[in-house]
């Protein structure tokens, strides 16, 4: 382009209003940094895929083209291949979720499912209920439809049902378009919702006639404690999102959405305009992986890896971080949520951390309303234990420095 | 699910208003029929991929996983791999379009690009200008953002610029969010816009400060006549959509969107929430195909195939269809547009055609406003010449029957 590049935006007044409310994800912006070897990345939720049997996957890819090329390389149905949906249905039996291929739509990762849900349910100003903090990609997906997102605070047992009930009382019957939850090893908090609260959530949702959306990308990544049944196993009315991104390969962008018949019909209609169909090639590869490789062994290996890394991170936090800082203790998943004294702004902290060669995800990205500046998400999934320890060691003095300033102010009676 | 399946929709009042205005695509609905061997499908725009060198593609798929698995199976950037964008930039040189990878976003087929454009530009009630008829997938994509779509009639030279100018005069400066056009072998009409009109379109767009979106899926499928430069080759301000679906494989869902810098920044932001990123696996396969296989030869073979099929279809129409029916004579692409006397409704005709084992796409799907019932799109790309001839032969008496009724009414002075 060179000289001819347009440097002013002649259409600056032309964009839709929804674009004004969109924020770029700090995590996506850090993506480039994450691939630099001198940076220790605690920011992204990239699974470690080093355990994948690449030769077997390579063979599967070649077989896919050789044996099923005319289907794998062609347009497919909007709902996805029936064979892929059969694989999804079979895998969900592990969770005691009983569905047929007709109950499932294959999506381009669970992210597309979030977009489709926003598109199907939300007029501008409609209320969506989420955990607070919640997955920033969900906030991004929903924000395109200009909803009013209400966050329900969490504790170690997940979303607080007393506060959800208060919220629903205020909103009234049908007062929200849906309740979005990540009950297992929540992103970003790492917290898991108790069985008692899951049951209570379903009761409240039923009472107020509000659909529940259960996003379960990390459910199979438990490395400690006992499994808790998914909401979808407790009620057929739950809209359930799954993905192969955390148990196989994010690069295949293959998720699934399960919903009651009428909802699925609407979502399918909405999906037609969004992408016509997903990649059949990727779907066949997913079928091969779960049909023809020892994927449960591979997953066991990944879980062991995450367990070690989580422990290394927790140990390092204990060893290096000042006592004013607290954090969660996940039993699975990829993330730990760290809360610092409220006068420390983790957005500002990130700039200094980057100078020290460490990235993390500042907490403000996980709230729609400016909260979260005193928190941060660290991912323990992608780096080796010694690198995790090194990252925490580098972060500690940066936090300590800000705390000392704070203590001095407190001692001087200024704060 | 069995007995527990929910048969009423307890959330029927919960869906977004946009869903009310969405129509299911008759073409998508016919997808299942299209794969039945007893049905001759003239409905879908599925390219014939029988010429693809499956062994080479299979090898490429395996190499992708073996050599680049840790990238191909992992999350990638929202804009797509730089290597894929380099391939796109290189291929566009054939059109005398000069862009760098920074000017490009890789999309999940061109369909996602259409969705992203609607999402980025349209508030409810905003005007979008398209050709009339236009691509039904574009109407579906845009309709999610509740625009007011104004169709400009076409003739054998493409969109009529006199009528576009009239429309723009009424709408005024900046009065539409964009002008969407498929200048080459348009879907559904098969018509190509003349060079003179392309120049005039750009003048008008500039004068009224309205972005032009050029969708060019069929540009490389010319089998007669001379190439006409794409709009993007005539102006750097054009937003350009490309795809590998018609020259390689739809199943990889790989398209590209080129736009001026400021527009691209907005679209990238919007895309983050839509899908985080596309499939890196598929992008590497696309790189391999255009870097390592004799794809130009394969394409030549496909074009010859389409040329033969187009001619077979035109010959059959000439031989079997009554003189009251007219049709376009494409120099490339996949489609012929047929217009029948206006008292014949092609929606109704389709039901009878299905009984005769033939599908086509009724014209009403290609207009947003109820027009098009006297027209139909037939695709000549997917069936063998003798099957195309057979399809036309089966359709002819169905049309003839309705014409005879009409003639009788006219003779009796009723019409």
Image: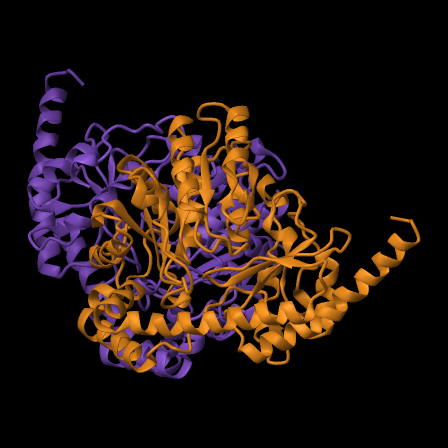
Chain colours: A orange, B purple
Please tell me how many numbered marks the rendered image carries. 0
Foreground pick, A156 / B162: A156
- Residue B269 picture quarter: bottom right
Query: Quadrant location of the N terminus of chain B?
Result: top left
Q: Left or right: where does residue A43 sit relative to residue B409?
A: right
Name which quarter of the figure residue A69 lies in. Answer: bottom left
Residue B36 % position (x, y): 11, 53
Residue sitting nearer the eye, B393 or A27: A27
Q: Is residue A196 left or right of residue B122?
A: left
- Image quadrant for the C terminus of chain B? top left
Q: Is A400 or B208 nearer to us in this picture?
A: A400
Q: Is residue A36 above or below residue B336?
A: below
Q: Does the rendering let one see residue B60?
A: yes
Residue at 74% across, 51% down: A342
Q: Is residue A23 left or right of residue B272?
A: right
- Left or right: B379 in relation to A228: left
Q: Position of residue B308 (x, y in %)?
A: 19, 64
Location of residue B351 in the rendering, given as x and y in whole percent from the top left corner: 13, 36
Is residue B209 in view from this perspective? no
In the image, residue A69 sits, relative to residue B323, either above or below, namely below
Residue occupying the point 57% across, 33% down: B171
Q: Please name the residue shown 42% across and 63% down the image.
A: A224
Above or below: residue A284 compared with residue B322: below
The furthest residue to the right: A412
User: Is B10 or A279 nearer to us in this picture?
Assistant: B10
Give x and y (percent) for residue B111. 40, 53
Q: Quadrant of residue B70?
A: bottom left
């Amino acid at each position: 382009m060179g000289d001819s590049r347009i440097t002013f935006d002649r259409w600056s007044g032309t964009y839709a209003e929804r674009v004004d409310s969109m924020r770029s994800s700090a995590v996506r912006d850090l993506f480039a940094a994450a691939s630099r070897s001198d940076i220790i990345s605690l920011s992204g939720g990239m699974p470690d895929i080093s355990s994948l049997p690449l030769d077997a996957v390579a063979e599967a890819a070649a077989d896919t083209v050789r044996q099923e090329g005319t289907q794998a390389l062609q347009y497919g149905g909007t709902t996805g291949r029936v064979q892929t949906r059969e694989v999804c249905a079979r895998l969900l039996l592990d969770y005691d979720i009983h569905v047929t291929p007709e109950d499932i739509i294959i999506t381009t990762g669970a992210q597309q499912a979030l977009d489709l849900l926003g598109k199907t349910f939300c007029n501008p100003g409609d209320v969506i209920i989420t955990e607070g903090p919640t997955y920033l990609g969900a906030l991004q997906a929903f924000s395109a439809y200009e909803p009013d997102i209400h966050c329900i605070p969490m504790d170690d047992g997940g979303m607080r049902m007393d506060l959800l009930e208060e919220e629903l009382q205020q909103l009234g019957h049908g007062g929200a378009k849906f309740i979005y939850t990540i009950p297992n090893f929540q992103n970003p908090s790492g917290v898991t919702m108790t069985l008692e609260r899951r049951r209570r959530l379903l009761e409240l949702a039923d009472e107020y006639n509000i659909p529940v959306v259960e996003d379960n990308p990390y459910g199979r990544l438990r490395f400690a404690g006992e499994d808790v049944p998914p909401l979808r196993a407790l009620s057929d009315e739950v809209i359930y999102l799954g993905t192969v991104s955390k148990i196989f390969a994010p690069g295949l962008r293959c998720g699934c959405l399960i919903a009651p018949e009428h909802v699925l019909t609407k979502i399918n209609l909405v999906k037609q305009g969004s992408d016509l169909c997903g990649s059949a090639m990727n779907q066949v590869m997913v079928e091969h992986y779960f049909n023809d490789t020892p994927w449960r062994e591979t997953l066991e290996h990944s879980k062991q890896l995450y367990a070690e890394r989580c422990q290394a991170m927790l140990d390092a936090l204990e060893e290096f971080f000042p006592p004013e800082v607290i954090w969660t203790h996940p039993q699975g998943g990829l993330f730990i949520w760290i809360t610092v004294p409220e006068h420390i702004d983790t957005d500002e902290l990130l700039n200094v951390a980057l100078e020290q060669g460490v990235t993390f995800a500042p907490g403000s990205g996980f709230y729609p309303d400016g909260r979260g500046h005193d928190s941060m998400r660290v991912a323990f999934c992608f780096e080796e234990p010694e690198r995790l320890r090194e990252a925490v060691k580098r972060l500690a003095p940066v936090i300590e420095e800000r705390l000392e300033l704070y203590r001095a102010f407190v001692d001087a009676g200024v704060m």
